[in-house]
Image (cartoon, rainbow, N blue to C red):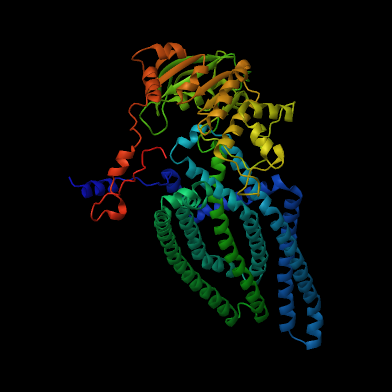
Amino acid sequence: MSAATTAAGAATADEELRWLADGRRIEAIEAISVSAMARRLPALVVRAFRLGWRIDRGAVGLLLTCQAVSAVLGAAGLFATTGTISALFGPGRVEDKLAHAAPSILVIAAAAGARSLLGITIRTVTIHLSPRISRAAEAEVLRATVAAELTAYDHAGYNDELEAADRGAEVCVDIVGEAQNLLASLASLLGAAGVLTVLHPALLPLLVIAALPQGIASVHAARVQFLANRATIGDRRIMANLRWYIHVKRNADQVRSDTMGEFLLAKYDQVGRRLDASSRRAAMQSARVSVIGAAASGLGGAVVWAAMLWLVSTGRMSLPRGGAAVFALTAVGTSLRGIVGYGADLFRTGMYLDDWSSFLDTAGGHRLERGTETPGAPRRIAVENLGYAYPASDRKVLDGVNLHVERGEILALVGENGSGKTTLAKLLAGLYLPDAGTVRWDGRDTRDLDPHALWRQVAVAPQDYARWPLTCRENITLGQPTAEGDAAVLRAADASGAADVVARLRRGLSTLLAVEWMGGEELSGGQWQRLAIARAFHREAGLLVLDEPTAALDPRAEHRIFQNLRAVARERAVVLVTHRLTNVAVADRIVVLEDGKVLQEGTFAELVAEEGGRFRELWDLQNERTGVPARRTRQDQRTVPDQRTRKDQRTLPVREDEGSGR
């Protein structure tokens, strides 16, 4: 098989990032009808005001009062309009007609002015309240995210559910305004319908029937737009990630040195075209049904006006009443269109809100559901027949692991990449729960412990440590200072070698470390790693986990860390994960992992002395350098053709003084 054929086969097998849609939810949404919308709208209005009520009861009370008063004034204005028309078109002199119509005209003017003031009040309160509701909804999503198991991020589709919940929180800014508009349209409809019913009972049913096709079309369009948005969540998240990879400083050097810019932009354009195609399909579907609905409603409106003209022309309705009916029909038509339009908007927002509330209820299906026992600083952490596999993977990362670590002891986990070291450390720290077997803190299963109380007894310096855009002090205390204050911070910084970093900062511990965001100071990778270790040393916890803690440190800084580790471990159980086997000499015991199983266990001296053992093999590989190619000699340099004379393969002349030491 040719290389080209192989490459083509590989290309067809490439996997793409896709959103895993919830089939049952999609089917439920597609089955939504006008009747379902009509049944659901009252609940959505109540839901909108409940959200507002939690934020500002006074504002919501004022909104509802203004809406009620506005509805009453609107009805009064319409009835006054009817009286004005009847007076003006009735028999008698013009002066008498005007005098008879004057009270109605005053009512119309007063109602219009008052409704304008109420409208301004409603808009002002809504503008003030809506962002607060959205912000509160976003905060609820953040709380639910923190309340999810760490393993949630390993499940396919969790991030898409989180994205949908974020979208739901975002549209919360519109829900009160949409509910207000719907209520305003409903209030106007009730007032106008009352007037129209008095004028002639047949007109109102005809007008409702005329508006029904537009309502059906609006519901269908809202459903199409929502489904299109849900279907493209994954693609929009991919585009956001690609934007981040392209412009963030962390990757900027590699984007340039690896000439990745055009390739990543091509990926971005490819996903964008996919989004455009989906949006175009949704827009065309919405347009088709909207045109049909508008045409049907237009035809129905013509029937209504024809019916009114017939009623007037046949004497079944007087001319003054006919004139009043014109105003009432216009008001009813506007109100019906408002109810249909605002109702469809609120309905669509409600579907997004369903994603939000569903995520809050279950944290995307991964809400923390553990025990309530509060652990203290552990004296002994024991692992019994431990098994763990990541979601959507058939391979066990850990299988049948048994070990323990006690307070004051340093336990080192070593092994090749993929042997399960980091996963085991996370299970010991209660960040993951085992699939099989148990992790026990002083005899109590971590499944039975309050997770937040457990994590307060854990200090972790992970491989990929966070670089918080906070002050140096906050980067060490993590917003949880001890009673000793800065004295404890400086002691931890000294033990981790970060004291030198603090001393060089412009304002010491008070210096912002956020050069990209707030104009603070920049640190190197090694300096950040010292701070990450300092925060673990500072934390008053019973279990200390150090995962490759010195990967970015120079030899002097690394030596300082391990020189101080024994003192730090005096009151803690310490788990050390590292590839640098010279560093594990500080450990009391060493566990060698391979393919998720414990292969060896013992002290440093015991494992180094065990000929043929895996630890000894890894030790020899790290310390043997006989396989490294020797340094190039001057004789080699003399025989290499110079690039400038490659055409005739001539070699450079050798200077007589070369090799003489001068």
Residue 231 visible in the picture: no
Furthest toward the bottom, the residue is 93
Q: How many numbered marks appear?
A: 0
Please name the residue shown 59% across and 69% down the image.
333
- Horizontal and vertical percent position of residue 389: 41, 27
Left or right: 384 in relation to 65:
left
Please name the residue shown 38% across and 22% down the image.
618
Quarter of the image where one finds residue 88 = bottom right
- Horizontal and vertical percent position of residue 421: 45, 25
Instruction: Specify the quadrant that holds the C terminus.
Output: top left
| Up-down relation of residue 100 to residue 232 (above or below) | below
- Horizontal and vertical percent position of residue 185: 64, 63
Left or right: 660 in relation to 248:
left
The residue nearer to you, when weighing 569 against 552, is 552
| Up-down relation of residue 86 to residue 1 (above or below) | below
The residue nearer to you, when weighing 407 against 527, is 527
Residue 323 visible in the picture: yes
The residue nearer to you, when weighing 635 against 570, is 635
Quarter of the image where one finds residue 67 = bottom right
Quarter of the image where one finds residue 614 = top left
- Horizontal and vertical percent position of residue 136: 65, 46
